[in-house]
């Protein structure tokens, strides 16, 4: 676990030890390694689903900007904090993308 800064140029990999279930628009995560459950509100559930689909924080950010009326700076802060929480709890890990143009 690292406390290094996280940026939108990174990719998230969900731990294979995490089981996700969506219930009425909200999500529940079960960390099979620890047996601990985590509840996600509607917005966090959407972030989780987007991370599962492609992992790219830039793509998650871009998709959320399209779907929600939110200040970009606030979204970036909230997304990076969400990912920091996931990595701190070993529910996900980060990999820095190689420098490429994002289309």
Image: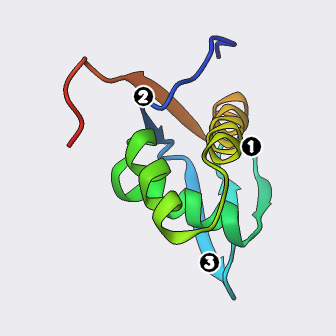
| 103 vs 49, nearest the viewer | 103
Q: Image point 63% across, 44% down: which residue? A: 79
Q: Is residue 8 toward the left or the right of residue 19 in the image? A: left
Task: Tell me the tag on residue 34.
Answer: 1
Crowding around mark 2 (Cα neighbors within 10 Å: few <14, some 14 to 19, many 20+) is some
The image position of residue 48, as x and y in percent, is 56, 58
**Camera-side mark, 2 or 3:** 2
Image coords of residue 69 (percent x, y): 63, 67
Numbered circle sitting on residue 10: 2
Could you say which disc has been placed on residue 22 in the image? 3
Vertical order, 15 against 8 (above or below):
below
- Seen from the viewer's position, the closer of residues 69 and 102 is 69
Please tell me in which quadrant of the rendered image residue 3 appears: top right
Instruction: Find residue 77 and report its image quarter.
Output: top right
Sequence-earlier tag: 1 or 2: 2
Q: Quadrant of the C terminus?
A: top left
Task: Mark 3 and mark 1 in contact? Answer it, CB < 8 Å.
Answer: no
Q: Nearer the viewer, mark 1 or mark 2?
A: 2
- Image coordinates for residue 100, horizontal then vertical, percent: 20, 24
């Amino acid at each position: 676990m690292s406390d290094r800064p996280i940026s939108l140029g990174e990719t998230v990999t969900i731990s294979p030890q995490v089981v996700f279930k969506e219930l009425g628009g909200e999500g529940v995560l079960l960390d099979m390694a620890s047996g601990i459950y985590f509840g996600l509100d509607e917005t966090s559930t959407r972030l989780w689903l987007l991370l599962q689909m492609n992992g790219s924080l830039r793509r998650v950010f871009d998709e959320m900007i399209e779907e929600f009326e939110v200040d970009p700076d606030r979204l970036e802060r909230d997304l990076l904090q969400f990912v920091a929480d996931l990595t701190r709890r070993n529910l996900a890990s980060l990999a820095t993308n190689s420098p490429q143009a994002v289309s």
